[in-house]
Each structure stands twice: as structure tokens, then as C-alpha cells.
Image (cartoon, coloured by chain):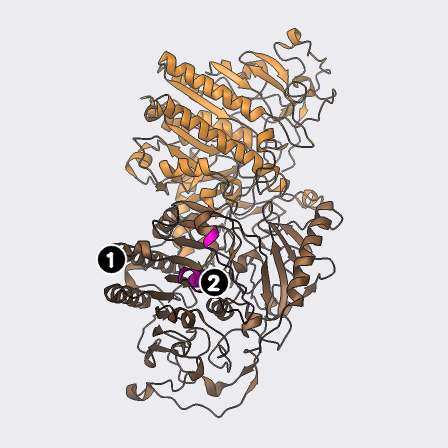
Chain colours: A orange, B brown
């Protein structure tokens, strides 16, 4: 089992989804050999909650990956976050262990960096990568550089030991992550043990990087170079599985954790195709994701599925592949996609679009109803932070939080995938569809029991000052005094 | 030789180019068996000039398909147009005749409907279709319904004899056009004669229609139904060529004459993917076109070309396929694409974006410089006519004609295919690139000899009142008195 999940690569970044430079031959080939999902979603328009949802099969509002510090706010796991994945959550690798799987995460963990949140305490057997995003600042000792772990201990830090040249964008991290993946797969094949590889790399997240060989290789600038390197790496992983003769025993799924970040465009920003807005928003550009399932000999080549899918389904589907049942003592939002993948079935299920603990929108069939609309505040927008550059849709991409709970904005995503033309409230179509959607929403809300919010408290003292292993490297830093505060989440 | 050119099907309407419903399996397969052009353009963002350019290999400003009634105005061939294709122009079928080709046009001619402009006077041997667009109004005798010709004479009229149900969108015209194509191909194969089929259908042009079998078949509404029927028809034409054993002797090219008309969205409007704006504009959405070359046994399957191409190239390429040279007594803008198609070569050539006789923009390599920007007037825009719905880019999609000739707006279409982020005028990149582009533009302007403008004069008396053959059908109408006027071209 290999799940490839990339930091904010957008739907429109793949040649198979119409990126005009068409620079992803390996992913396009993966799609032509496997199944392309056209209607696949993440559980949240931001990294940490999306990844927590993937590994727990549950909406962030259930597993605690949200904040109540403000209404409808996105929140994640920066260095000063106090919270992380609760022990009460059951993660995919914990469950797979029962079926004898060896589990490895390569890349960004994103589920909390304090000791109790360590991935090896939550079911993974191996880890190579870092707990947070590496925002820098570069070599600034006032904020520790993000550590890189091998299993229990850190082995260095971003910038200091794992170079990223912020000027040229050069870094060989993706090559290291690729080699880790190939080695792990080889070892598991040799020992004949079932494995779960979670390859969660971050080259397309700011600061975007690529290794020397790929710098300048794209028509799209540095971001495109990073995409090309990822594409090349996925191709090498698939070829490695084939070479080892285990491709027919290995289910591989490729997707992303949120839409492309358009604020970084055009130099570091990806593409969400013709979908509206990007990361941070509950428009299609924020949550519709590229998705490909690959399993030669099982999945018919060249398949296209319109099954509404979600990263949370990878939890349930992976368990199903391992012959396991999802836990029955809690609400699981993911569904088993195997009937859709192997038999072409279409399972009727809604998609919920959350921001914090607010259900902003819901998709049922081809219809999407917005109960709340918000891009970001006028205050942020006036500073040049634009989640929807060149895509203002009046009354839709609003800069105040607009409530539509009594009369939701309704879109038909078949005729209008770009969410530009709300249906007339007076139309018969609107009335009929909203009746159906209201029932879905009512049931969802009635049974919703939110988890304890993990992203309310921040404290500079919890940053990665002295991760385990720092002593051996002489890389321990002195933390400041503890001063817990409400985290500030502006959007 | 088969050229399929569709009325305003957009770049983003193909599954292969990322249409989220992915409903064009035949065109996608055509692409996977042939070559996909990612950077292919029309010569004008409007139907008539684009088609005149395709058949003459020359920019509309050279062949006369433009107006000087207003600055930078789009113009075409409505029923009251006095002009049409000048006798002095040499059309592709006229030239192909010299190599023994039998030429047929099926569908919209668009190059003028008065007797001197008849396609059979300009090289075609057969015609089935109509001279203009069928805007209706339905069964309104104050304006004649558009005639349908078989060769020299009309055999009926749209709405009256060739039904289009404006309520349901039902019409079986595409099926008739398909049958005409299959029959023609069979006859030519039987007589062993080389042929040129120009299949220029119009189902995706307002009023959009589809035959009963396809109504409701798409997720995208009626427009999607029309696309599905076209997709199905192209598949049938290709299969027919294969069945007759002549696919390896038949070069097939599929493209469109202008970008999707976003003003008709979402119910009748197509998609230009992530490109800016649509039909009528010189942004990418108005002129970048879907394009596929198919020639089994010659074109390597699954090819992708970044050759900058143009519909005018189909003129020169077709001549090349027939072993003919383009005329040497005039400026030909089309180039021979065979080196790009068969040997993967990349030929450096610019793309010019015209509106009327104004060069609005030019593309050189990955850079596009706008010398003039305009979407439409404030007056039109305030009436709800929007060529760029939900895509306003400040200073780019302007509602006044903005001159940038001294300091063009420059975009890098690799990093920014959506034309949202003009390069800084002060940047080194801007300076270096503009030097190169200025030289190209200067040379272009120095050698430009505009043709006599054909779209300046309109006269209700020239409408399709009494086309040849009307007597036999009892369908002659009485024309009003001649009253030639300056045509009004609002955008």
C-alpha cells in the first residue's frame, strides 16, 4: 500500500487535468494505466487537518484538528502549536499493524510535533522527515529551524543540514525522500512483509524547491520544476514496484492535501484548473484534488471515475484492502472506494466543506450548496493577500463572512464547475434540490459530535528547540519560558 | 484530408484538456492515438475571419475579413453583410484541385452568402450546409430563416425544414452532417480519389442543439450534450476511415474556430479551461484552441507538441501533404506543421492576435505582449454582456480600449497561462523579452498590406430572401429595397 500525498499540488497541475505545459508524463501514464478520479476532495482546505483526516478517516471537526478561537477559521500545526493528534484517535497505521503491516512515513507529519504526537507513537514503524512546515526563517536562531527525524530522533535541521537555497530554489530533499521510499520498498519486498508507505513530500509547498537536475526544466518556473521532480519520482516508485514484481500486490494512490495556494502565484503557485480560488477556501479550487488509483491487474487501465471521493476514504479503503474493518466505536467519514475502483460502482454520498468547525458548504450529486461564503477579510485582502486572484465572483468570493443558511447559494458543478452562476432561488430546480440537500445537512448536524479542538493554544516554548537527539548533534536550543496564548488564526 | 473545425468549442471542453466531466472519450482517444497541440491558436476570436484564415492561410486583415468601421472591432458575416471572400483570394480547395482532390464542405461556410461567394465558386465540389449562423428568429418572416444548401441550391431552411426545438434543444442536424461525411468518404474511397473534407459543424454555437439520443446525456447541460454528440461523430468518422482501410492515407485534424463564448454560460457556454475570457477577446480564452492531429502509421501515438500553431497552418500543411507549394505571389501566414508533427521539431514563429485591423497582442515563445487591451465597452458590460465572467483582472480585461503600445503588458504564459500577472516593466526579464518582441512586431507591421475590408457595409436587401433553388420549394421571400449602411460592430 502506497499513499502519495503532496502538499498543495493543485488539481490543474497535472497534464491529465489540462495543465497547458503538460509536464507530468509519469502521473499521466499512471492515470492511463489506472483510474482517474475527477470528483475527489480533501477534507479541509489546509494541510494539517487534511492529513489528520486522511489518517483517521474522520473529519477534522471530529478528530480535533480545528480551532474555536474564531468563527470558520483555518488552523494547522505551526511550531508553536500546543496540540496535535489525540491519543484517542485511531490512525490507519495503528490498525494496519494488526494485519502485520510495516508502516513508514516519509516527509511531513503535520499532526503535531510534541513528544506525545510522534508518528512512531501512532502506529508508524519508521519515519524519515520533519514534523512541521519549514517556513524558516533561514538560519535565524530566534526561531528554530525545522528538524528532520530519522525514526525517534532528529538527525539535522532544514537549512542547516538539509540545504534549501532560497535564492535558486535548489534542494535535493525530494531525491532523498525518493531514495528512502525505494529503499523501504526493497526491504519490505525482501522480507515478504506487507507494508504501508505514506510518502508525504513537500517540494510544492512554499518555499518551493527542486534538485539541481530539475531546476529550469519546466515552462512554469520553479513550481513547475518541483512538479516535474515529483512526477519523475512517482514514476520511479511505480517502476520500482514493477521491477520487484510486486506491482500487482501493491495498491498505489496519489492525491494532494489541499488546493494550490494561489497567493504564491505565479512564481511559486500551482493551478486548480478552472476551479474557483485555492487553498484556504471552501470553493472547488480549495478542496477538489487530483487523484489517481493504480493497481495493475486489478484496476482496469484508463478508467475514469465520477465517484465523489475524499482523502478520508483512503483510510477505509486501505483497511478494506488489508481485510480489516474500520473501528465501530466512532463515526468514520471515509467510505470504502473499492466497489467504485474495481467494479465501477457509484456510491451516493455527500462531501462536506469545513472551515474550522463551520460547515461552509456541502456537495450532493452534482449540486453544491454554500451555507457560508468567505475568501478572506477585507483587512487581509487590502494588504494584497488574495486567495482568488483574478477570480472575483460577486456575492460568492466574499470578503466578509456571509451567512446563507436560510437560503444557500446553490451551484450545478456539471454546468458550472467554476462556481460562477448561482441558481435562481425561485427556480423549481433550486427548490427540489435544496429539499434533498437540507435533509442531508440536517442528518449530518444532528449526529455531529465535535472533538476537543487542538488548535486553540499556542506557546513559543513548545517549538522545536530541543527535539530528541539534539544533544548528540549539539543542536539543542534554549526554549523561552512557557507563555500559552490563544493562537491567532486570521482566515 | 479531413479538417474538423467546430464553432466555438473551447479549449477546456475536452476531457484531454481537463474538462471535469471528462465526456469526450473519442476525442481523448484521438489524442492518445495522435498528437495533442497544447499551443494552437485561431487567427481571430470570431468565426468568419477565423474560417477565412483557415482556408486562405492568411490573416483576416490580409484577406479582407475585417472592418474599419470602428477601432479594433470584431466583425463577421451576418445575413445583411454585403461582403465575403474576394475572388482574388486563393482557397485551399482551389489549390488542392490541382492535385486531383475532390473537395467537400459540410456545415457552415461563413465566408459570405451572396452568389459570388458560393463555396462551389471557390474550389469546393460539394456542399451540404448553410452559409451563415442560424440566429433565428424562429419562423419570423421579417428575417429569412437561414437556408440549407445541397451544392448549388438551397433545399430548405433552418427551423422550417431543419427543425431546432429552441425549448428542448433537440435537432438532428449533427446526425445529418455526420451521415453526409460518412457518405462522402465512402464515395471517395470507392472511386480511389484523393479528397478534402471540411467538416464545419455548428451544434455548439448558440442556439446549441443535440439530437434526441444525446439530450440529457451530459453532466454539463445542453452544451455538453452537443459536445458529446460531436465527440461521438468524430469517433464514427475515424472508425469509418479505419473500416475502409484508408486511415493511414488520411490526415485528420481537429480544432475550433474561436474560444468558447462565455456570455452564453452556464447553460449554453463552453469552457476555455483556465485561460482568460472567451470568444470576442484576444486573451488566451478567445484564441487558444483545442487541436489534435491524427494519422495512424505516421504520427506517433500519444504525442504532445508545444509548437505554436495556428489554423492558418492547416492551409500550408494540407498543401504540403498534397505535394503542393503555397502561392508565392502573396504573403502566407500559415506554416507547414509536418516537421512538428512527424519529426517533433519546434519552429520558432510568432502568433498575432488581431481584433479588426488592430494587432492587439503577439506571442513569441512563452511570452505574450498586449499592445491593446479590451474586453468590451462599459455600455455593453453594464447591460450584462460579459466576455470574462468572474475573471476580471484589473488593468487587463479593460472595458475601455487601453493602448499599451509604448509599454506593452507582458505575460509569461508558462508560469501564468491565465494572464493574471503582468511582468514588472522595470524587470530585466521585461526589458530583454520586449527587445526581442519589438523586432518581431516591427517586421510584421512593416510588411503588412491590409486587404480591402469586407465587413464595412450591411444591407438588409442582401439577406437570404431568395437563394438559388427557392422557387422549386416555394420558399422565395421578397427582399426589401436596397439600403446599404455602415455595419454596426459594437465590440
Residues behind callouts 2 and 1 on a single chain: yes
**Residue A325: percent from the left, percent from the top?**
33, 23
Disc number for residue B376:
none
Q: Chain of mark 1?
A: B
Above-or-below relation of B189 to B472 = above
Q: Chain of mark 2?
A: B
Neighbours of disc 2 within 10 Å: few (<14), some (14-19), many (20+):
many
Neighbours of disc 1 within 10 Å: few (<14), some (14-19), many (20+):
few
| Residue A34 visible in rendering | no
**Residue A277: percent from the left, percent from the top?**
56, 45
The secondary structure type at the circle numbered 2 is: helix
Report whether B238 appears left or right of B83. left
Q: Which residue is mark 2?
A: B316
Q: Which residue occupies the foreground of this view, A187 or A73?
A: A187
Q: Nearer the viewer, mark 2 or mark 1?
A: 2
Part of the protein shown in magenta: B317-339
User: Which one is earlier in the sequence, the residue at label 2 or at label 1?
Assistant: 1
Above-or-below relation of B217 to B101 = above
* The magenta stretch spans residue B338: yes
Name the quarter where the C terminus of chain B is drawn: bottom right
Q: Which residue is mark 1?
A: B244
**Residue B108: percent from the left, percent from the top?**
40, 71
The secondary structure type at the circle numbered 1 is: loop
Amino acid at each position: 500500500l502506497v499513499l502519495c500525498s503532496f502538499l498543495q499540488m493543485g488539481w490543474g497541475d497535472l497534464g491529465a487535468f489540462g495543465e497547458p505545459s503538460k509536464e507530468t508524463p509519469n502521473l499521466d501514464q499512471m492515470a492511463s494505466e489506472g483510474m482517474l478520479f475527477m470528483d475527489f476532495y480533501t477534507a479541509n482546505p489546509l494541510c494539517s487537518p487534511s492529513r489528520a483526516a486522511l489518517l483517521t478517516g474522520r473529519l477534522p471537526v471530529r478528530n480535533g484538528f480545528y480551532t474555536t478561537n474564531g468563527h470558520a477559521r483555518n488552523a494547522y500545526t505551526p511550531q508553536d502549536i500546543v496540540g496535535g493528534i489525540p491519543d484517542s484517535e485511531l490512525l490507519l497505521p495503528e490498525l494496519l499493524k494488526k494485519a502485520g503491516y510495516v508502516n513508514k512515513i516519509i516527509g511531513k507529519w503535520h499532526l503535531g510535533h510534541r513528544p506525545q504526537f510522534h508518528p512512531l507513537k501512532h502506529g508508524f514503524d519508521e519515519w524519515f522527515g520533519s514534523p512541521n512546515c519549514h517556513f524558516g526563517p533561514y538560519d535565524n536562531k530566534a526561531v528554530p529551524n525545522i528538524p528532520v527525524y530519522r525514526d525517534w530522533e532528529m538527525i539535522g535541521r532544514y537549512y542547516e543540514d538539509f540545504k534549501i537555497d532560497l535564492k535558486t530554489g535548489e534542494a535535493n530533499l525530494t531525491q532523498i525522500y525518493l531514495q528512502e521510499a525505494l529503499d523501504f520498498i526493497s526491504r519490505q519486498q525482501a522480507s515478504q512483509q506487507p507494508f504501508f508507505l505514506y510518502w508525504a513530500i513537500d517540494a510544492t509547498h512554499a518555499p518551493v524547491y527542486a534538485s539541481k537536475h530539475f531546476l529550469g526544466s519546466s515552462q512554469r518556473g520553479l513550481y513547475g520544476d518541483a512538479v516535474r521532480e515529483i512526477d519523475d519520482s512517482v514514476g520511479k516508485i511505480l517502476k520500482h514496484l514493477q521491477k520487484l514484481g510486486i506491482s500487482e500486490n501493491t495498491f498505489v494512490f496519489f492525491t494532494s492535501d489541499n488546493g494550490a495556494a494561489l497567493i504564491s502565484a505565479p512564481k511559486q503557485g500551482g493551478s486548480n484548473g478552472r476551479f474557483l480560488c485555492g487553498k484556504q477556501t471552501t470553493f472547488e479550487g480549495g478542496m477538489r484534488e487530483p487523484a489517481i488509483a493504480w493497481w495493475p491487474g486489478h484496476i482496469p487501465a484508463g478508467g475514469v471515475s465520477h465517484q465523489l471521493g475524499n482523502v478520508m476514504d483512503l483510510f477505509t479503503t486501505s483497511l478494506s484492502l488489508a481485510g480489516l474493518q474500520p473501528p465501530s466505536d466512532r463515526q468514520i467519514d471515509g467510505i470504502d472506494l473499492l466497489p467504485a475502483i474495481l467494479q465501477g460502482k457509484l456510491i451516493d454520498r455527500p462531501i462536506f466543506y469545513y472551515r474550522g468547525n463551520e460547515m461552509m458548504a456541502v456537495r450532493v450529486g452534482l449540486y453544491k450548496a454554500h451555507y457560508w461564503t468567505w475568501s478572506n477579510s477585507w483587512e487581509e485582502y487590502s494588504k494584497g493577500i488574495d486567495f482568488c486572484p483574478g477570480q472575483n465572483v460577486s456575492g460568492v468570493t466574499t470578503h466578509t463572512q456571509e451567512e446563507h443558511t436560510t437560503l444557500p447559494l446553490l451551484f450545478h458543478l456539471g454546468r458550472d464547475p467554476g462556481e460562477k452562476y448561482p441558481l435562481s432561488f425561485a427556480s423549481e430546480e433550486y427548490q427540489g434540490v435544496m429539499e434533498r440537500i437540507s435533509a442531508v445537512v440536517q442528518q449530518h448536524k444532528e449526529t455531529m459530535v465535535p472533538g476537543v479542538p487542538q488548535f486553540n493554544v499556542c506557546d513559543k516554548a513548545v517549538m522545536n528547540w530541543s527535539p530528541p537527539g539534539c544533544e548528540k548533534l549539539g543542536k539543542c536550543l534554549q526554549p523561552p519560558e512557557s507563555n500559552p496564548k490563544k493562537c491567532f488564526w486570521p482566515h
